[in-house]
Amino acid sequence: MKKNITLFTILLCSIIANAQTNPAILNWLQNTTVTGRHYVKNNSTPIVDAAIANCQSIKYSATSVYVATNGIPTYITGPFQDGNPSLATAQNAIFKLPLNPLQNTGVATATTGGNIGLFINGVALFDYRDGVSWKNSTSSLCGGPIQPPCMGDGVWNRDAVVGERLGFDCSKAHPAMGNYHHHQNPSAFSLDLKVISDVCKLYASDGLYAIDSSKHSPLIGFAYDGFPIYGAYAYKNADGTGEITRMKSGYTLRNITTRTTNANGTAVTAGPDVSTTYPLGYFREDYKYNVPVSSSQDYLDSHNGRFCKTPEYPNGIYCYFATVDENWNSAYPYVVGPTFYGVKSATKVTTITETVTTYTPGGNTGINKSELDESKINVFPNPAKDFIAIQLNQLTKNNIDVELYDLTGRLLQKTVLFQGSTIVNFDTRTLYEGTYLIKIIDNGNVVNKKIMISK
């Protein structure tokens, strides 16, 4: 009996220690009140949905974390202008991920279609593909010189980030049968240095975080092997030293004009010649892994990651990164892939069959005053005319109040920057010219910003 009590005590201490230190428990965005919103085409006023956004609960055992989520973000979804009739709908899912991920020392496991990871707001991560390839060996309706590519033989696989760009909303995501997901870095198109989609002009929205090249990017999710996913920037050196730098994909486009071989030179079923219709990068097989011999540690491995130290893992762990190019446009293989580094063990479960503890965030889980000061809060345009945008270059873990005052101290407008969002707007068309004050408030911490309105 005494032995059993001792074993129980050891297990309990292990569980408590995990809750206190394991980022796979601590970093999910929990919410039970804010619902999702979506746009419909030709209407710039979002519709409020019934489904609760972000993650609804986090439970854990000594070995696993269970994330209950609808797969709906707090940022506005849609519309999907490629004709996709689906809306982001509640998935009512529980995902089981390992707390102690393991390296796969055997043959690497390829990523697949569908979920391959989970962002910290409970939204799904897909890999590069959209389920479409150039030819289908059993159908005469696909892959000819005038026919479109379709579900095929898996030789020339279309890159979703390129082939489906028209169908992504402002947040760079879209649904598949209602399962809303990102294939790429979850930062809004409008926040990139070179904007390659105008969808945000018509349907302003947000992403999970805003890229900040001066800071280590936040932890934004976990892959299905349990290893963490970070944004685009990190310490240059894997030991946690050096300046902040962009993590670079090790994949480059092949120097080809015809599509008749794989990157290793083996012959394959021919795809379309490289053209303006099917440019290099249109298919996954257009890439090869080719890190320069003289490269530094900021080039990632073939899984799109590296072993390194981060703010959440000061002792080091293998990390994936959401890669972008110098213009902050998404760079292949985007997040994870084309193979996993670790043992793929995450699953979607209907019930939890082991004893678990519910994790409840304690204290101020938002950002404190000093961090607000350092986060380079952008208020623009200044002077403003029709609107004011307030952007935080930091992932918000709390709902943050944003208020607009005149200089007499009268409150004119108020809004909320929801957890997992980065930007909000005020309509200023009815305001007089002059100076106004914006207050950004997080659990009593306040940052003030002055703004000019000029007609």
Image (spheres, grey):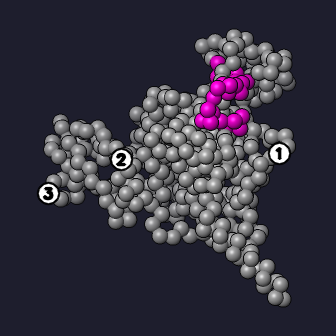
**Residue for badge 3:** 408
Residue 286 forms part of the magenta stretch: yes
Please tell me whether mark 3 sits on a helix, a strand or a loop.
loop
**Residue for badge 2:** 377
**Cα separation between marks 3 and 1:** 66 Å
Vertical position of residue 326 compared to residue 65: above or below = above
197 relative position to 377: left or right: right
Q: Amino acid at mark 1?
A: Thr
Magenta extent: 280-304
Q: 332 or 404, which is in the foreground?
A: 332
Q: 140 or 311, which is in the foreground?
A: 311
Report the mark closest to the observer, 3 or 1. Answer: 1
The residue under the point 48% across, 51% down is 395
Q: Amino acid at mark 2?
A: Ile
The residue under the point 20% across, 42% down is 452
Report the mark closest to the observer, 2 or 3. Answer: 2
**Residue for badge 1:** 105
